[in-house]
Amino acid sequence: MSASGPSFTGVHELLSMIRSLIARRRFLSGTPDTEVRGDHPLPLVCLLREEGANDFLPALHRALGGHDAPQVPHAYLDAAAVDDHVLDRWANTDRQTPPLLPLLDELSAALGADRFGGRPLRFGLYGLADWLTAQRLSPEQGGHEQEIADLLRRRSGRVRESDAAALTGAFAAAPTSVGTVGSMLYLLVAAGRRLGLRRIGRRVPGLGREARWFMRRQPYMVPRHSTSFAGFAERLTEGRRASENPEQVRKLLVHAFLEDLRRVYRRRHRHLLPKRSGWRRTAYTTVLLDNVTEENGGWELLRLINEVRNETGELDPLLVVAAAPRRPSSPEAEESAEPHPPREAHRALEHWLNTLPGRRQRLVENARYLWIGLPPQSGQGDEDPGAGDAWRTVASFRPRAAPLPACRGVAELLLSAALVLTLLPVTANVVRSWSADCAYVRPGFVDGVSVRVAELGRKDRQCIGYSDNAVQVFGTNPRLRAAQAAIFEQNEVAARLHDQQPGRPYLGIVHFVGLTHRAASPDTDHAAAEELEGLLLRQRAQNVKSETQPLLRIIVANGGDGMRKAPEVVRDMLHPLFDADPSVLGVVGLDRTVEETERAITELGLAGIPAVGTTLTGSGLADLSPLYFQMVPDNTRQARLIARYATHLGAGKVTLHHPEDGDSYVDSLLTATRAELGAAGLATESRGWRSVGQVASLCADDTDRGDEIVYYIGRENTFFDFIRSVTKGCTSRRGLPRVIAADAVSRFVAQKENRRHSSLAGQPMAYVGMGALVTLAGSSCVEEGRPASLLGPGTPLDAFCAGYANLHRELARTLPEDETPQMPWPAERTGTTYDVAGLFVDATAALHERLGPSGPGAAPHRAAVAQQLRDSTFQGATGEVDFREDRVGNTRNLAVLEVTDIYDLASAPGCVFMLGDLFHPGQPRDTATGCPR
């Protein structure tokens, strides 16, 4: 006797053969002489003992279970003692009959124990079938499908009582407790019960998968003889099985047991998707069945397994090693060849595999049996000197490790890593978008929005692109965002009215300016908001119930700080928008005369897109595109205004202060001003700066400059520093020159935060106003909704003021106090954009009226709109707009407006000098200054 188990000749080969059967093949593994891959048929290893005691199976059980956490799922059963074990286990339960196959029931209990290191085996199919064989139904005759359905529900734990019974019971008393209506309801319920409730009641929640297998995927007990699973289940119950073939019932139990194991070991879902829990099982389930006889049911179980395997043709992961004193008393068993000696175990297995296909095809009763003779223990036969090593090898046997992807956590880790790698660029883009207050949307993903993050400098990310809805709102200032939100609401109103009245003209225009800036830059958000509010006023005037008035949609576009990304926005975003949507007729705004804006104008012209500069004053812009129009006079006209005003004042000298590295706007205005001042014979001096803080104070040398003019030609972002520099050390206004700022400084004037610096208190200034008639409408326009009387009644300014007053009150209610419009006069930028939108509306209406629509709600072609702008005049809140002679509004009014105290927000600008047309030729004007009176 070996220290670990019995020793006999061939024990090493026998143990080696059993160990090779326990180890599960890899999924794609196979032998050179067969095309079978992965799992292979497992024999029923039958060890026939010779006379004398032999504890081979108990020793094998001890060896397989010798680890702290055994890796091979296995069970040892003494067939002679199983009946007593089963009765003891079910003694204290409500089971009314013992299991039909006690050995199979004991195996399910032993293998289901949580002691093999992995997920415990679960025998759901077998457990359900075995449970049904122990149920007894009520004795009354007739169908019991509803009763069995209720039993199944209670087993599944989903429903405590029959749904159908509960429903029918609830309505049972209806005829006695209600009138005619109740009786009719009862009849309907009764009909429903007949037609549907019984069918609904037979459904078993939680057992759908099991029901499908019993009814569709297994052959025993002829499942098609039942119309439902409840009916099939009824045939298994005690008292109903008398009409069934007992052999079929037993085969069903064995087949269900083997199917439970197949499901646990299955390595693929639906023949395609991997099933990781099955890949982790690298050792077959092993059953050691000792003392098998016909009396204790051992040979019956082996026969049933053999026949189920033959008849279904399915592989299963159950390895049975049985030990018996003799063969069963069946003709085929008696005629079997002599058992192979243990030393020939491997050769016997190879022979069995080769002959199996033919034997199982003939459904041979013992086709799956592999007969091995088991000699007596050491002392009664030859002893194998290597037995000790063989037993130690089995005791140390551990199945191979599961494939790495099948290990717990590995697939999740790989999937997480793949998701991270996949989503990392997206996540980075989302973070970048959030940091720039930019919606993360893929191109074309959201209608009406196309944006992306632009890097304008170190730690300066800005959101550029366009939007016509609340998915993307540009900027951070509350007033600026509120204006966009109100415009987007009007877009929805326009779209809704267009759906209701498809025959009305429906047009869109793009307002394209710089809406974002560096955090450290002086704030000009209120000036940008003023322009948007002008567009909003025009939308509210248009998007009302009407038969003929065009509906107006505004698309808000951002070119970034200083329009530095304007060409990219035009090329990459606006071009596709105009190509896809013919109702979008043109671009307005075009903030700042800089190189980037000029390139954008050129690209728009090349694409056949009309563009109207709202506040641009650069000279020569009309040469960049044949479809470019300019609402306000250019820099040559502004230079002429300054020259004539200086002559009017009798100025002794005009000093031009400007940055040395100016942009197109600064350079063209400086050149034009020099030329006009020279032509007027005025003394002129130019002083450039590299840093505005280095500009010399006007009172540094105690020179009296009271008859001089200082003309600031620069941007609004350096104006505050300029004023502080030129007034540094001055204790009196006496002897200081008059300071006039170029039109760009109107943004500075519109921003409360810019003016509320104590160093500006008492400091007067003048600036060039491009929409002076709106500014001069005064406080009555804001407070009462009517312009100042000096402008004369009946002008388009009346309609503007009526809408502006309502908007001003609305903003005062909805915005924080610091963000509401603080100036007691209407903003000139609001009036200008109000008129720009009106240009497109009037052109569209005129074309529809004269030529008729090309289709329901269709907008006219952009070329037709551009030509209409050239052929007509427009009466606006800022005066008449006439492009018949020139696409630049050089005949329009242009004024020098004066503020007596920059710090005082109530200090309204007054007109001190004006050129150009007013609302009509006969309007009264001051003969010396040209200002209206």
Image: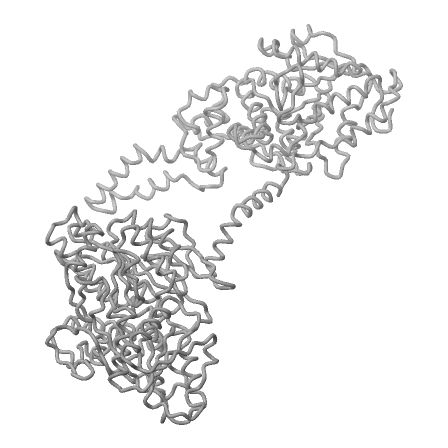
Q: How many marks do you count on the picture?
A: 0
Residue 56: percent from left, percent from top: 79, 23
Q: Is residue 733 left or right of residue 222?
A: left
248 relative to 694, above or below: above
Q: In the visual, does 547 lie left or right of 895?
A: left
Image quadrant where one finds the N terminus: top right
In the depicted structure, whether residue 590 falls above or below residue 320: below
**Which image quarter is the C terminus in?**
bottom left
Q: Quadrant of residue 473?
A: bottom left
Front residue of 834 and 644: 644
Q: Position of residue 364 (x, y in %)?
A: 61, 10
**In the rendered image, which quarter is residue 53 located in?**
top right
- Here the colouring is one colour
Q: Which residue is located at x 32 percent, y 89 percent?
A: 707
Q: Nearer the viewer, residue 240 or 24?
A: 24
On screen, residue 345 versus residue 531, left or right, reads right
Against 773, is 257 above or below? above
- Image quarter for residue 825? bottom left
* In the foreground, 377 or 349: 349
Q: Position of residue 344 (x, y in %)?
A: 78, 14
In the rendered view, would you say 704 is above or below 279? below
* Residue 571: x %, y % from top left: 37, 52
